[in-house]
Image: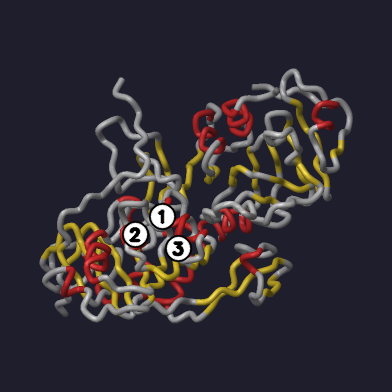
Amino acid sequence: MINKVVENAEKALLGVTDGMTFMLGGFGLSGIPENSISELVKLGVKELTCISNNAGVDDFGLGLLLQKRQIKKMISSYVGENDEFERQMLSGELEVDLIPQGTLAERCRATGAGIPAFYTPAGYGTEVAEGKETREFKGKMYVLEHAFEPEFAFVKAWKGDTAGNLIFKGTARNFNPMMAMAGKITVAEVEELVAVGELDPNQIHTPGIFVQRIFQGTAYEKRIEQRTVTPKS
Amino acid sequence: MGLSKQEIAQRIAQELRDKWYVNLGIGIPTLVANYIPKGIEVEFQSENGLLGMGPFPVEGTEDADMINAGKQTVTVLKGGSLFDSATSFAMIRGQHVQLTVLGAMEVAQNGDIANWKIPGRMVKGMGGAMDLVASAENIIVAMMHTNKRGESKILKECSLPLTGVGCVTKVVTNLAVLEVKNGAFHLLERAPGVSVEEIQEATEGTLIIEGIIPEMKL
């Protein structure tokens, strides 16, 4: 088996420079690559374009990169819950491209699947479709959407093996599998790194072929954004 | 005047049918899950990658890896499943989900919906709403009939940037149940104690009133 393991986040992010385009997995704060984000903050790389469904909160997730003004452009479907983001967006410091969530997911998938563009019904007749090619299929209108070109994809899994095979847990899977497929270099951080043979091949969500570097993550906070519970009766 | 938010949800729940997969938006739509009619089975889809969504977890068992599209901690029921975002939107665009319920700022008589952006104000994004409304065959909007200034949100044409075109099939407001077809709102039911005249008064779009309009049963 091809060994993809690197020692830590620092080694995993080798080659990251200013001006690059990244994909970062996660939905809200669930399944975000916490260790890679911390390392990006430490590296201080700037002028970044970040493709991520959300933009974190003020003091966690991508909010940490926003605080340090490392992001030039965000490509997301929903960016609430972040005051610093709002300030930078309204002042024009931050460029924001809002796209429908399903289109975002499919553009990530297309990127990794060798599909340069595809038609989707989402956004037809709205400002999202302005300037884009549209076409009718069987009486319904569709919008042409394109794949991305990310230099790195940062994903987070529950378990991974040294060959880069990944298993996600719960709804922390979200955008991670498609982004793993899409990165020119995909960096996977995992809660538990195991030897090959320890994961059941039947249960792998992301095959190791999509992962270039994998490392054992540390000190996961796994913050809950909206804690909603049923009281103990 | 008219229904509370809970009652709007309760009325929408009467639209659920046996063996339907349903996507509920944030706000009033989420409450629909509390009023599933007896004797039918439905499964709730959450677009962040969950089918068979259950209630909020018992205090102390909440898990950062188990949330709904509103980022609230939830549970997965027995027989539920988990998947990635591309698969989730394949379910939605591929019309495997039978009903979408969502909120709106404005609805127009041709079925257009606006619910994601107010020019000049902070834009948070459309999330999955555009994919949902572009694809679902059956879209019910849960909303208040008028805004805080008393102006109708049931319009001839939307004034706000659109989320989707010609897609809304039914609207349930605090005042009425409306069907959207042939370029007009058709009044199906009145909220208890609300007159046809009051509904007409609160509706800017073309309202078709045929025969005697019954009161909703909750």
Could you tell whether A198 is left or right of B164 in the image?
left
Give coordinates of residue A142: x percent, y percent: 65, 69
Q: Please, which residue is most extreme toward the top here?
A: B193
Real-space CA distance between mark 3 and mark 2, rounded to the nearest whole angstrom: 30 Å
Looking at the rendered structure, which numbered label has been put on residue B86?
3
Real-space CA distance between mark 3 and mark 1, rounded to the nearest whole angstrom: 29 Å
Could you tell whether B11 is left or right of A26 in the image?
right
Could you tell whether B144 is left or right of A4 in the image?
right
Give coordinates of residue A16: x percent, y percent: 27, 78
Residue under numbered circle 1: A84
Amino acid residing under circle 1: Glu
Which colour scheme appears in the figure? secondary structure
The nearer-to-camera label among 3 and 2 is 2
Tell whether label 1 touches label 2 (CB within 8 Å). Answer: yes
Viewer-side residue, A38 vs A231: A38
What's the chain of the residue with tag 2?
A: A
Give coordinates of residue A132: x percent, y percent: 64, 75
Secondary element type, mark 3: helix
**On the rendered image, what quadrant is the N terminus of chain A found in?**
bottom left
Residue placed at 48% from the left, 42% from the top?
B43
Q: Residues within 10 Å of mark 3 (few under 14, many from 20)?
A: many
Viewer-side residue, B115 vs A90: A90
Could you tell whether A182 is left or right of B16 in the image?
left
Secondary element type, mark 2: helix
- Vertical order, B167 against A136 (above or below): above
Residue placed at 79% from the left, 47% from the top?
B109
Residue under numbered circle 2: A67
Same chain letter for marks 3 and 1: no
Looking at marks 2 and 1 on the same chain, the residue that comes earlier in the sequence is marked by: 2
Same chain letter for marks 2 and 1: yes
Same chain letter for marks 3 and 2: no
What's the chain of the residue with tag 1?
A: A
